[in-house]
Amino acid sequence: MSFSRSALRYAHTNGYTGLLYTPRGEFIITCGTDGDIRHWTSISDDDPRSSCLGEFVMCIAHTGTRLLASTDRNTVHAYTFPDMDSDGIMMRFTAPATCVRVVGEYTAAGSEDTNIKVLKGDTPGNETVLEGHTGPVLSLDMFVERKLLASIAGDGHLKVWNFEEGKELKSVSGLPKVNSFESASLFGTPTFEPKSGELLAYAADNEIVVLNTANWEVAFKLRDERVSSNYSCCQFSPKGDRLAAGTTKGEISIFDVKKRKALPVEMPPNDCNSITCLAWNRSGEEEVAFCDATGQLGTVFLSDGNEIVGEDGVEEAQDDLLDGYEFEGADELENPQDDGDGVSLEQLKRKVMNFADPVDVDETSNQSLASSRTAPVPAAPQIKFFKQQAAFQPSSTPSDLEHRYMAWNDVGIVTGHVEPSGDGSIDVEFHDASLHHALHISNYNHHNLASLSSGALALASNESSKLVVIALAAAGNKEWSLSLPDCESVEALVATSHLVAVATSSSFLRIFSVMGTQREVLSIPGPVVALAGHEHCLMLVYHSSHPSQTQQHLAAMLVTINGLNLRLEHLPVALTPGRNLSWLGFSDTGSPSFADNMGLVQLYRKSSNAWFPICDTMKQSSSVSNNYFVVAVSERRQIIQAVLCRGTSYPMTNPKPMLHELRMQIPLCDIEVEKSELEDALLRSSLMQVDGAEKIQKETAIKLFALACSGECETRARELIESIACTELLQLAVKYATKRGRIHLSDRLCELLPQLEAIQEARKQQTLLGSSGIAATIVLPMTPTSATQTSGPKPKAIELNSAKRGALKRFSNSPNMFKAASAASRPSTPDVPHSPLDTQENIFGESEPEPLSGKTAEQRTPLNSVNPFAMKRKLGDTGVIFGSEKLKLAKK
C-alpha cells in the first residue's frame, strides 16, 4: 500500500493558503492572501469558480449549508454555498481571525489578538471567550462530545480547554514562538481522534506527538524516516485510522495509527514548498489535499496495488493474495514432497499465477523477481535553502492592493489607487504644506514605484523602462522623463534632495541630478534588494551570495557624490538569521539604517565602521500580534517614527493610521534595571549625533559613578571615569567621592589627572588632523599595571621647598584647578568649543556655604580636603593640610 502525488496546481498568490473538502467530498475549496475563494471539482479542474471576499482570506470552514470565512474586516463572515451570497457576521475580533473550526453545532475561531471564541448554533452573540494565550492563535480543533478544545498559539504553548466552562485543562510548552500569523511556518495543528476523542495529536519538530486525553500524558510518537524536515501541520482521517502530516519542505507523511508506522508516500517535486494546510476527503480515507506557502494545490491518493515497494509491501501483498483462495495442488504446497520446512516459491508461482515449469523460467525472470524483493534505494535528501528576498521599495505596501502606500517618509506620503475599471491615480501629501502643495496625478503609465524627497518626486514601474521625475523646487518645466536603454526595467528607485537613482534589471545603478543630468552609471555585484538615499549619499543593498539554509547574505554599496568626485564603499549588512529586510533608509543626520521583519532597527556608524542595534520595536508593542511599519529614524530626537499595524504587517489606507514615535533603546541585558537604563543613555549619546551629547554624557556618567559608589563598587567607578577620560567629569567625581567620605577613591581618581589630560590632548590633535585629511597616529602614555608597579623601581619623589609649596597652595586653592593644570600642560592649539559644565549645585542639589563677613573663605578643593582617617600635619608657611604621606609628584 502506497500513496502517490498529483501534479501541483496554481491556486493563490504567495502566502498562507487554506483548504477544505465539502462534507460529501464534491468540492475542494481554497482561500489565500489574494482575497479569493475558489471551488475545485477535482484537482484536474481547469476552470475553478472564483469569488473575491476582500483584501485577503485567512481561513475557511464549512457548516454543510454555509461557508465561513475570515477576511481583512476582523470578522468571521458567513456566506451561502455555493452561491456565495453574504449571510451575516458570526464573530468579531480586534484582529483578523486566523483559524475557524466547525464541529456539530459549535463554531470556534481564534484570532491574532490572542483570543478564542466558541459559539453554539448559528445565531451570533453569547460567545464563550477563552483567554490565556499571549501570542496569535495559529490553529485549533474541537471534540464536542467531551467539550474539549485544543489550541496552539505563537507563545509556544498548546492549551486544552473545556470550552463550555471556559476552563483551561492542560498546557504544554516548548513549541516554536512567533509574533504574527504571517511569519509562522510551523502551525502545530492539534487534531482530535474523531471517533472517541481518546487521542490528541500535534506536530512538534520532526515527529508527531500523540497525547492520551484521559491523563494528558504522551501515549506515543510517530516518526517517518523518509522525511528530512520539521512537520508544520497534521490531520486525522475521518475514521481515525490514519494521520497525515506535512513538512516545511513539502513532504507528506501518512501514518497507520494502529500499527504506528509510516506508509510509503511519493517524494515531493522541487517546486513544492512548506505545507500550510491539509484536508482529508470526507468520502473515504484514500485522498488527502494540501496547499503550500506559494499558493499551490495538490493531492496525495492511494495508488494501485501493483505499485508495491519494499519487503513489507511484498509480504502484505502475498498475505492478501493467499487469503481465502483455493487452488489445485494446495495439498502439495501444504505437504511438499521434500522434507523442507518452507513453501516452494516455484510451486507458488506455477499454481497461483499460472507460470511455466521451473525449468522454463529463464534467468531474466529470476532477476526481475530478485529486483522486486529488494527495497529501492532512498532518494538523496534535498537541501532547502532560505528564500531569497526580491527587490522592494522601503516604506511601501504590497503592489497587488487596490489602495496602497507607494512611499511614506519624513517628507510626505505617496498613495496609489487602482479602480475596478483599470484606471489609476496617485495622490501626494506633504507633511509640511509650505514645502509644496498636495498633488493628484493620473497614473496613465501604471507606475507602481515611487520615491519622495524635498527636491523631487520620482515615479517608475518594474514592468517598463520609463522614469518620470517631478522637480518640486524648480521653476518653469518641472517634469522630465527618459527611457532606459536595451529594454532595462526599474527594480528599485530613490529620490533625494540632490539626486535621483534607479537600479535596473541589467545590474546597473544609474544616477541623475534632480533636473535630469546623467551623473554616473555603476555596476551592481548582485541581485538588488532595496535602495535608499540622503542628500548626496546613496545606499543600495544587494545579495552578496546565494542564501544558506538559515539566512540571507546581504551587502550594501555606500555611494557618496561630491561634485564630480564619487566614493564607493562596500559593507556587509548584519541581518539576523531567519529574517528579511523590511525597511532601508537614512537617519535625519545621514547615518545608514535598516529594519528587519521582526522589528529590530540597526544603525551604521561610519566612524566605527559597524552596525549597532538601536531599537527592538516589538518590545514596545502591547501585543505580540502587532507590528510597526517603520517610516523614519531621528538621531537628534532619539525616536523612530512608525505606524502601528494591529494583526498585520502593513497599514491600510482607509482610515489613515496615526504615526507613533518610539523611543530608541539599545537591547542591553536587564534593561529594566536603573544601571542598564543609564548605560543605554550613555551608549546612545556616544554612538549617535544627539543634541547636547556632551552634557548628556556627563550627567549620565556621574549618575553611574554615584550608583557604583552606593553599590560599594569603587573599582567600577574608577574604571568608568578612566574610560570616559574627561577632566571636567573627573573633577565632579572627585568632589562627589570626597563629599561621601570615600577618601581612598578620591586619591586614586586624582592620580588619573595626567593620564586623562594626555588622552584629551591626543583626541583633539586626532580631530584636527582628521579634519585636514591627515592620518594621525598618536602614542598615549601607558598606565602601569599592577605587575610593573610591584616589580619595577618606583619613580623618585620630589621634595618641595617653601617656594614650591606656596605655588602649590595657590594652584590647589584655585576654583578651576583642573582647567588651569590642563591648560598649562597643553601646547597652543585652536580653541574647541565646549558646552557649559554643570555645577555641583545642578547635579547634587547642594550649595557651598557663603563666606563669613570680614574673613576670606578658603576655597575647598579635593587636594586640600581633610582626611579624617589619617594623621595630619600643618605646614606653617603655606597653611595647606596634607595627609600622613608627603605629596609626591612623579616625573613624567
Image (cartoon, rainbow, N blue to C red):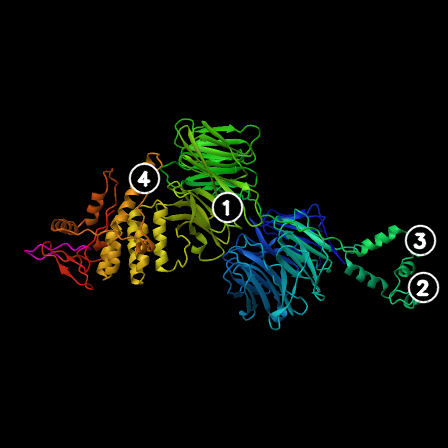
Local packing at callout 2 (Cα closer than 10 Å; few below 14, some 14-19, many 20+) is few
**Percent of width and height locating residue 543:** 53, 41
For mark 1, give the secondary structure. strand
Numbered label attached to residue 581: 1
Counting residues from the N terminus, which is met first, the one under dot 2 or under dot 4? 2
Counting residues from the N terminus, which is met first, the one under dot 3 or under dot 1? 3
**Percent of width and height locating residue 732:** 24, 53
Q: Quadrant of residue 373?
A: bottom right
Front in this rendered view, residue 244 or 278: 244
Residue 419 vertical position relative to residue 92 in the rendered view, above or below: above
Which residue in the protein does label 3 denote? 360
Separation (CA) of disc 4 from disc 3: 99 Å
Separation (CA) of disc 4 from disc 1: 35 Å
Numbered label attached to residue 328: 2
Please identify, in this view, whether the residue under mark 2 or under mark 3 is nearer the observer.
Answer: 3
Can see residue 656?
A: no
Which residue in the protein does label 4 denote? 767
Can see residue 408?
A: yes
